[in-house]
Image (tube, helix red, strand yellow):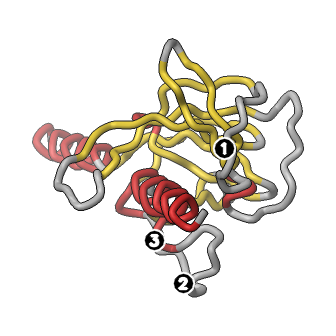
Amino acid sequence: MQGMEENQAIDHDLDNNLNDQFLTFVLGAETYGIDILRVQEIRGWEPPTSLPNTPDYIKGVINMRGAVVPIVDLRQRFKIGEMVYNDSTVVIITHFNYQIPESDEVIQKTIGLVVDGVSDVHDVNLAELQSAPSFGDTKRVSGEFVKGLATLDHTMIIILNVDLMINQGIYEEVRQFLMAA
Protein backbone atom coordinates (compact mmCIF):
# COMPACT_ATOMS: atom_id res chain seq x y z
CA MET A 1 0.00 0.00 0.00
CA GLN A 2 2.83 2.38 0.81
CA GLY A 3 4.44 1.85 -2.63
CA MET A 4 1.14 2.75 -4.30
CA GLU A 5 0.92 6.00 -2.32
CA GLU A 6 4.51 6.86 -3.27
CA ASN A 7 3.72 6.29 -6.99
CA GLN A 8 0.66 8.55 -6.73
CA ALA A 9 2.79 11.22 -5.05
CA ILE A 10 5.40 10.95 -7.83
CA ASP A 11 2.68 11.20 -10.51
CA HIS A 12 1.26 14.27 -8.76
CA ASP A 13 4.72 15.87 -8.65
CA LEU A 14 5.20 15.20 -12.39
CA ASP A 15 1.84 16.86 -13.15
CA ASN A 16 2.88 19.90 -11.10
CA ASN A 17 6.12 20.20 -13.11
CA LEU A 18 4.01 21.09 -16.16
CA ASN A 19 2.53 24.06 -14.31
CA ASP A 20 3.84 27.54 -14.95
CA GLN A 21 2.72 30.68 -13.20
CA PHE A 22 1.13 33.47 -15.20
CA LEU A 23 0.29 37.03 -14.25
CA THR A 24 -3.20 37.71 -15.52
CA PHE A 25 -4.35 41.14 -16.62
CA VAL A 26 -7.39 42.71 -18.19
CA LEU A 27 -7.71 44.43 -21.56
CA GLY A 28 -11.26 45.47 -22.32
CA ALA A 29 -13.50 42.53 -21.46
CA GLU A 30 -10.81 39.85 -21.89
CA THR A 31 -8.28 38.33 -19.51
CA TYR A 32 -4.73 37.70 -20.72
CA GLY A 33 -1.73 36.07 -19.10
CA ILE A 34 2.04 36.36 -19.37
CA ASP A 35 4.72 34.22 -17.78
CA ILE A 36 5.37 35.59 -14.29
CA LEU A 37 9.12 35.01 -14.77
CA ARG A 38 9.05 37.72 -17.47
CA VAL A 39 7.59 40.34 -15.12
CA GLN A 40 10.10 42.68 -13.48
CA GLU A 41 7.61 44.94 -11.75
CA ILE A 42 4.15 46.48 -11.94
CA ARG A 43 3.92 50.27 -11.89
CA GLY A 44 1.04 52.69 -11.70
CA TRP A 45 0.28 54.69 -14.83
CA GLU A 46 2.35 57.83 -15.35
CA PRO A 47 2.43 59.52 -18.76
CA PRO A 48 5.73 58.68 -20.49
CA THR A 49 7.90 61.01 -22.56
CA SER A 50 6.47 60.93 -26.10
CA LEU A 51 8.66 60.05 -29.06
CA PRO A 52 8.09 61.47 -32.56
CA ASN A 53 7.59 59.24 -35.57
CA THR A 54 6.35 56.13 -33.74
CA PRO A 55 3.09 54.18 -34.05
CA ASP A 56 0.19 55.37 -31.88
CA TYR A 57 0.45 52.36 -29.56
CA ILE A 58 4.00 53.37 -28.58
CA LYS A 59 3.16 55.82 -25.80
CA GLY A 60 6.76 56.90 -25.28
CA VAL A 61 9.58 56.02 -22.89
CA ILE A 62 10.26 56.20 -19.17
CA ASN A 63 13.51 56.40 -17.26
CA MET A 64 13.64 53.45 -14.91
CA ARG A 65 16.73 53.56 -12.70
CA GLY A 66 18.85 54.90 -15.55
CA ALA A 67 17.42 52.61 -18.25
CA VAL A 68 15.20 53.95 -21.03
CA VAL A 69 12.14 51.69 -21.27
CA PRO A 70 9.64 51.93 -24.15
CA ILE A 71 5.96 51.91 -23.14
CA VAL A 72 3.42 50.08 -25.34
CA ASP A 73 -0.35 50.38 -24.90
CA LEU A 74 -1.60 46.83 -25.54
CA ARG A 75 -5.21 47.99 -25.87
CA GLN A 76 -4.21 50.17 -28.83
CA ARG A 77 -1.79 47.58 -30.22
CA PHE A 78 -4.53 44.91 -30.21
CA LYS A 79 -7.13 47.41 -31.49
CA ILE A 80 -9.43 46.75 -28.53
CA GLY A 81 -10.68 50.33 -28.32
CA GLU A 82 -9.69 53.60 -26.78
CA MET A 83 -7.67 53.38 -23.61
CA VAL A 84 -8.97 55.18 -20.57
CA TYR A 85 -6.11 55.94 -18.20
CA ASN A 86 -7.35 55.79 -14.62
CA ASP A 87 -6.35 54.55 -11.16
CA SER A 88 -6.51 50.87 -12.20
CA THR A 89 -4.32 51.37 -15.30
CA VAL A 90 -0.89 49.85 -14.79
CA VAL A 91 2.34 49.27 -16.67
CA ILE A 92 3.76 45.76 -16.51
CA ILE A 93 7.54 46.04 -16.89
CA THR A 94 8.50 42.90 -18.80
CA HIS A 95 11.73 41.23 -19.91
CA PHE A 96 11.86 39.57 -23.30
CA ASN A 97 14.48 37.90 -25.45
CA TYR A 98 15.28 40.09 -28.46
CA GLN A 99 16.64 38.38 -31.56
CA ILE A 100 19.10 40.76 -33.23
CA PRO A 101 18.11 40.96 -36.93
CA GLU A 102 20.28 38.87 -39.27
CA SER A 103 22.14 37.39 -36.30
CA ASP A 104 21.92 34.40 -33.98
CA GLU A 105 22.54 36.68 -31.00
CA VAL A 106 19.74 37.04 -28.47
CA ILE A 107 19.80 39.73 -25.80
CA GLN A 108 17.39 40.50 -23.01
CA LYS A 109 15.46 43.77 -23.30
CA THR A 110 12.84 45.49 -21.18
CA ILE A 111 9.50 46.97 -22.26
CA GLY A 112 6.49 48.36 -20.42
CA LEU A 113 3.04 47.03 -21.32
CA VAL A 114 0.08 49.29 -20.48
CA VAL A 115 -2.99 47.29 -19.43
CA ASP A 116 -6.38 48.11 -17.90
CA GLY A 117 -5.49 46.33 -14.67
CA VAL A 118 -3.77 43.28 -13.23
CA SER A 119 -5.79 40.43 -11.81
CA ASP A 120 -3.82 37.66 -10.12
CA VAL A 121 -1.11 35.05 -10.49
CA HIS A 122 -2.40 31.63 -11.56
CA ASP A 123 -0.86 28.21 -11.98
CA VAL A 124 -1.55 26.93 -15.48
CA ASN A 125 -0.92 23.37 -16.61
CA LEU A 126 0.78 23.84 -19.99
CA ALA A 127 -0.30 20.37 -21.11
CA GLU A 128 -3.93 21.49 -20.80
CA LEU A 129 -3.61 24.66 -22.93
CA GLN A 130 -6.02 24.74 -25.86
CA SER A 131 -5.01 26.08 -29.24
CA ALA A 132 -6.33 29.46 -30.28
CA PRO A 133 -8.59 29.38 -33.35
CA SER A 134 -7.10 31.03 -36.42
CA PHE A 135 -8.97 33.93 -38.00
CA GLY A 136 -6.31 34.96 -40.49
CA ASP A 137 -4.09 38.01 -40.23
CA THR A 138 -6.35 40.44 -38.39
CA LYS A 139 -3.51 42.53 -36.94
CA ARG A 140 -5.15 42.14 -33.55
CA VAL A 141 -3.82 39.36 -31.36
CA SER A 142 -2.35 37.11 -34.01
CA GLY A 143 -2.59 33.38 -33.29
CA GLU A 144 1.19 33.12 -33.38
CA PHE A 145 1.40 35.46 -30.38
CA VAL A 146 -0.98 33.28 -28.38
CA LYS A 147 0.68 30.40 -26.56
CA GLY A 148 -2.75 28.92 -25.84
CA LEU A 149 -6.04 29.31 -24.02
CA ALA A 150 -6.52 28.25 -20.42
CA THR A 151 -9.78 27.96 -18.52
CA LEU A 152 -9.57 28.84 -14.83
CA ASP A 153 -12.66 29.11 -12.64
CA HIS A 154 -14.90 29.30 -15.74
CA THR A 155 -12.86 32.20 -17.17
CA MET A 156 -10.99 31.91 -20.46
CA ILE A 157 -7.43 33.30 -20.23
CA ILE A 158 -5.45 34.11 -23.36
CA ILE A 159 -1.84 33.11 -22.62
CA LEU A 160 0.52 35.30 -24.66
CA ASN A 161 3.91 34.35 -26.09
CA VAL A 162 5.84 37.42 -24.93
CA ASP A 163 8.95 36.91 -27.07
CA LEU A 164 7.04 36.54 -30.35
CA MET A 165 4.51 39.25 -29.51
CA ILE A 166 7.19 41.83 -28.77
CA ASN A 167 9.86 40.80 -31.31
CA GLN A 168 7.65 40.24 -34.34
CA GLY A 169 4.48 42.00 -33.29
CA ILE A 170 5.89 45.22 -31.90
CA TYR A 171 9.62 45.69 -32.54
CA GLU A 172 9.38 44.49 -36.14
CA GLU A 173 6.41 46.79 -36.84
CA VAL A 174 8.20 49.76 -35.30
CA ARG A 175 11.30 48.99 -37.38
CA GLN A 176 9.19 48.87 -40.59
CA PHE A 177 7.31 52.03 -39.54
CA LEU A 178 10.58 53.92 -39.06
CA MET A 179 11.99 52.66 -42.38
CA ALA A 180 8.88 53.90 -44.20
CA ALA A 181 8.98 57.33 -42.52
User: On the rendered structure, is 120 left or right of 44?
Assistant: left
CA separation in Å, label 2 and label 3: 9 Å
Question: In terms of image quadrants, where is residue 128?
Answer: bottom left
Instruction: State yes or no: discs 1 and 3 in contact (Cβ < 8 Å).
Output: no
Q: Residues within 10 Å of mark 3 (few under 14, many from 20)?
A: some
Of the numbered discs 1 and 3, the one sitting upstream in the chain is: 1
Of the numbered discs 2 and 3, the one sitting upstream in the chain is: 2
- Any part of residue 67 in sight: yes
- x 22%, y 49%: residue: 11
- x 23%, y 40%: residue: 9
What amino acid is found at the position of numbered circle 1 in the picture? Phe
Front residue of 159/57: it is 57
Dot label at residue 134: 2
Q: Which residue is mark 3?
A: 144
Of the numbered discs 1 and 2, the one sitting upstream in the chain is: 1
Q: Which residue is mark 1?
A: 25
User: On the rendered structure, is 176 left or right of 10?
Assistant: right
Give percent across and percent down for residue 175: 48, 58
